[in-house]
């Protein structure tokens, strides 16, 4: 018998936990990514250190981190871009599952970046991470100049999980710096189903940013995309995933 619990905390606001979702995650992970895997300790430690450092508990769910890492592996990605480092959890997923990969990650919050650097070092991946502290709207144009000048490789995978009102701005810059066939993900666009609620967008910046990126990407002829709804131990949400033409 399943049970759904409605909860609230300052990091996530209102959210739900359903025993069916957690049971499925626990069962599948026990077989498909058990605790005996080499990166399990590094990932768990990153979450522990992030919590101890006072970072908000808004990292991607475990299964989503594995999914993104598999995307990089299937596409043979060697260079990845991330907007919103937080404690480095999602980047550690990508790096520990893809030894050929290098990640450029951008974080606005100095404290978050300090915690992430320590987590990267503890995970043994610091030599493959370029962590840039600054606002994405300032950093991305400079990266684009380097890409166009041939000083930086084009990206094969981009994960966008930062200030939501800039979702499409970040997406646009990512497309300009991606190779053909690259994958771009924008996280947290479903927002408990509020994505389809026009009224919710008037009061909620996350929903407003989500609707904007979905509508803008729908008109963007450089890519083809869809939105996947997800349930997990971190509530009902989803992400936009796009392929660069």
Image (cartoon, rainbow, N blue to C red):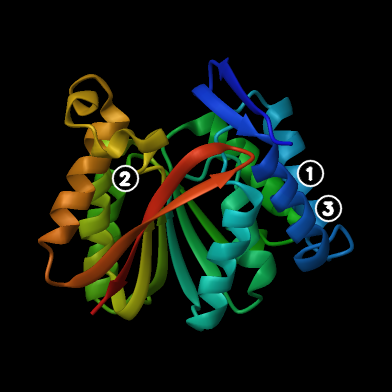
Badge 2 or badge 1: first in the primary sequence = 1
Q: In this view, does 39 lie to the left or right of 174?
A: right
Q: Please name whichever residue, 12 or 14, is drawn nearer the observer in this view of the structure.
A: 14
Look at 51% across and 45% down and name the residue there: 85
- Mark 2, mark 1: which one is toward the viewer? 1
| Place of residue 150 in the rendered image (x, y in percent of width and height, measured from the top left) | 29, 79
Name the mark on residue 45: 1
Look at 14% across and 53% down and name the residue there: 216
Q: Is residue 84 left or right of residue 245?
A: right
Name the mark on residue 136: 2
Instruction: State whether residue 132 appears in this view.
Output: yes
Residue contact at pointers 3 and 1, CB within 8 angstroms: yes
Q: Please name whichever residue, 161 or 32, is drawn nearer the observer in this view of the structure.
A: 32
Local SS, label 3 = helix
Task: Determine the CA span between mark 3 and mark 1.
Answer: 6 Å
In the image, is residue 162 above or below residue 157? above
Look at 40% across and 52% down and name the residue there: 239
Instruction: State whether residue 56 appears in this view.
Output: no
Task: Determine the CA span between mark 2 and mark 1.
Answer: 27 Å
The residue where tag 3 is placed is: 41
| Place of residue 168 in the rendered image (x, y in percent of width and height, measured from the top left) | 22, 49
| Place of residue 244 in the rendered image (x, y in percent of width and height, measured from the top left) | 27, 74
Local SS, label 1 = helix
On the image, which quarter does residue 38 sit in? bottom right
In the image, is residue 94 above or below residue 98? above
Q: Which residue lies furthest to the front in this view?
A: 1
Name the mark on residue 61: none
| Place of residue 131 in the rendered image (x, y in percent of width and height, measured from the top left) | 50, 51
Label 1 neighbourhood size at 10 Å, few (<14), some (14-19), many (20+)? some
């Amino acid at each position: 018998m399943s049970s759904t619990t409605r909860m609230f905390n300052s990091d996530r606001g209102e959210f739900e936990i359903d025993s069916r979702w957690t049971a499925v995650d626990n069962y599948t992970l026990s077989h498909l990514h058990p605790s005996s895997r080499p990166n399990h300790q590094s990932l768990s430690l990153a979450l522990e250190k992030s919590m101890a450092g006072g970072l908000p508990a808004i990292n991607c769910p475990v299964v989503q981190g594995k999914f993104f890492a598999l995307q990089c592996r299937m596409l043979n990605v060697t260079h990845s871009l991330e907007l919103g480092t937080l404690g480095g959890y999602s980047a550690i997923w990508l790096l520990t599952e893809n030894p050929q990969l290098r990640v450029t990650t951008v974080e606005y919050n100095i404290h978050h970046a300090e915690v992430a650097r320590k987590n990267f070092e503890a995970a043994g991946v610091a030599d493959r991470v370029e962590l840039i502290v600054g606002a994405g709207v300032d950093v991305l144009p400079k990266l684009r100049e380097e890409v166009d000048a041939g000083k930086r490789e084009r990206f094969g995978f981009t994960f966008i999980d930062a200030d939501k009102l800039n979702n499409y701005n970040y997406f646009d810059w990512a497309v300009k710096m991606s190779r053909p066939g690259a994958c771009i993900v924008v996280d947290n666009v479903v927002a408990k189903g509020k994505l389809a609620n026009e009224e919710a967008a008037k009061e909620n910046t996350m929903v407003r940013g989500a609707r904007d990126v979905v509508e803008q990407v729908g008109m963007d002829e450089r890519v083809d995309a869809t939105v996947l709804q997800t349930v997990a131990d971190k509530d009902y949400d989803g992400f936009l995933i796009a392929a660069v033409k």
